């Protein structure tokens, strides 16, 4: 069941859970996370970064639509970290039901200007919009990028931003970073800032850079108002590590994808299921049918 970002996240906000947004960088990753979501009856956002889309080609979106139209669980197709108005329009034309405009690197007024322009265009076609305020860190190994120094989201400024742009969800900066943290870095979420933002802003909040943060902090963030969490590195690393094992096992020479990839997909699926349970989105698909 293909729905918009606003539809999928409003239910999450009302019922105090977070929808997983898995970056599906290949057909195998897509298949694995969809299996996980169907088994655990979780709504899902399939996130595709512009760089991933460039690699996979536009036809990949048709594959995502096929999955969405052949399952009863709620599915949203989301453009992750759209960097320009042109990328946003391209995604809308392809059939994305949610787009993110990431102008967080611009000054406040310029961020509002481009975000408002995106909201006007997207809402006219029924597509939802996510924006970002503050900056997400960058561990140096992710396509999502980021900055070396995190600028935390100011709660009062967040309220003004939401009121002036009419966005449907807001990605906040509370101490996460894209990618996997180095071993000598211990990530810590500023849950105090999250609480202040929630007090000021009454729409679904998004956590980027959700890989590698302590489960306890993530779980607490969900109870405090995070309704969407992006997961990219964790599922891709699970896939990669298993692929290494497969290729180095038993001295066999592997070349057939149907022999190499199934174990990798199982590893990805396992991680996805762990995240779904952590976000409390398991068994929540039924909430989208109540009252129908």
Image: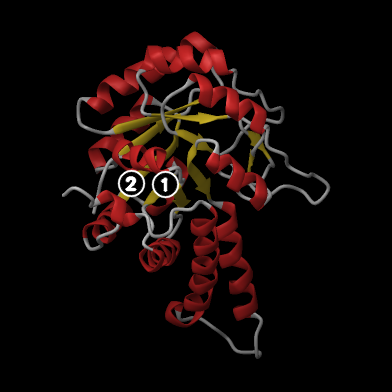
Q: Are marks 2 and 1 in contact (CB under 8 Å)?
A: yes
Q: Please, which residue is most extreme toward the right here?
A: 184
The answer to whether residue 4 is seen in the rendering is yes
The answer to whether residue 74 is seen in the rendering is no
Instruction: Name the residue at 64% across, 77% down.
Output: 245
Sequence-wise first label, 2 or 1:
1
Residue sitting nearer the eye, 96 or 216:
216
Label 2 or label 1, whichever lies nearer to me, is 2
Per the rendering, the mark at residue 48 is 1
Up/down of 20 relative to 266, above or below: above
Per the rendering, the mark at residue 280 is none
Q: Quadrant of the N terminus?
A: bottom left
Residue 216 image position (x, y, % from top left): 66, 49
Residue 188 image position (x, y, % from top left): 72, 39
Residue density around tag 1, few if under 14, some if 14–19, many if 20 or more, within 10 Å: many
Residue 274: image quadrant is bottom right
Residue 257 image position (x, y, % from top left): 45, 77
Residue sitting nearer the eye, 56 or 174:
174
Residue 149 image position (x, y, % from top left): 71, 27
97 sits left or right of 22 in the view: left
Up/down of 111 relative to 266, above or below: above
Residue sitting nearer the eye, 245 or 206:
206
Q: Please, which residue is most extreme toward the top here?
A: 109
Per the rendering, the mark at residue 77 is 2
Residue density around tag 2, few if under 14, some if 14–19, many if 20 or more, within 10 Å: many
Residue sitting nearer the eye, 174 or 284:
284
Label 1 secondary element: strand
253 sits left or right of 29 in the view: right
Instruction: Name the residue at 48% across, 15% down.
Output: 159
Residue 112: image quadrant is top left
Instruction: Name the residue at 19% across, 47% down.
Output: 291
Label 2 secondary element: strand
């Amino acid at each position: 069941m293909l729905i918009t970002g606003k539809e999928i996240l409003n239910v999450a906000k009302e019922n105090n859970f977070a929808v997983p947004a898995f970056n599906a960088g290949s057909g195998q990753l897509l298949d694995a996370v969809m299996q996980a979501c169907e088994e655990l009856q979780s709504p899902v956002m399939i996130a595709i970064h512009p760089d991933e889309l460039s690699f996979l080609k536009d036809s990949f979106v048709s594959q995502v639509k096929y999955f969405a139209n052949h399952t009863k669980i709620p599915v949203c197709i989301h453009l992750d970290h759209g960097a320009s108005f042109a990328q946003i329009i391209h995604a809308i034309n392809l059939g994305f039901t949610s787009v993110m405009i990431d102008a967080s690197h611009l000054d406040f007024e310029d961020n509002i200007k481009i975000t408002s322009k995106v909201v006007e265009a997207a809402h006219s076609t029924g597509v939802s919009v996510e924006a970002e305020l503050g900056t997400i860190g960058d561990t140096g190994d992710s396509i999502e990028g980021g900055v070396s120094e995190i600028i935390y989201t100011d709660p009062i400024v967040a309220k003004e931003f939401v009121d002036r742009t009419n966005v449907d969800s807001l990605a906040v900066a509370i101490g996460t970073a894209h990618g996997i943290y180095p071993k000598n870095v211990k990530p810590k979420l500023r849950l105090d800032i999250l609480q202040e933002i929630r007090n000021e802003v009454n729409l679904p909040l998004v956590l980027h850079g959700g890989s590698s943060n302590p489960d306890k902090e993530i779980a607490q963030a969900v109870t405090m108002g995070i309704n969407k969490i992006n997961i990219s590195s964790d599922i891709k690393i699970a896939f990669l590590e298993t692929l290494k094992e497969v290729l180095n096992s038993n001295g066999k020479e592997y070349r057939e994808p149907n022999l190499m990839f199934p174990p990798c997909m199982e590893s990805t699926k396992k991680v996805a299921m762990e995240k779904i349970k952590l976000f409390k989105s398991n068994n929540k698909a039924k909430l989208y049918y109540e009252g129908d």
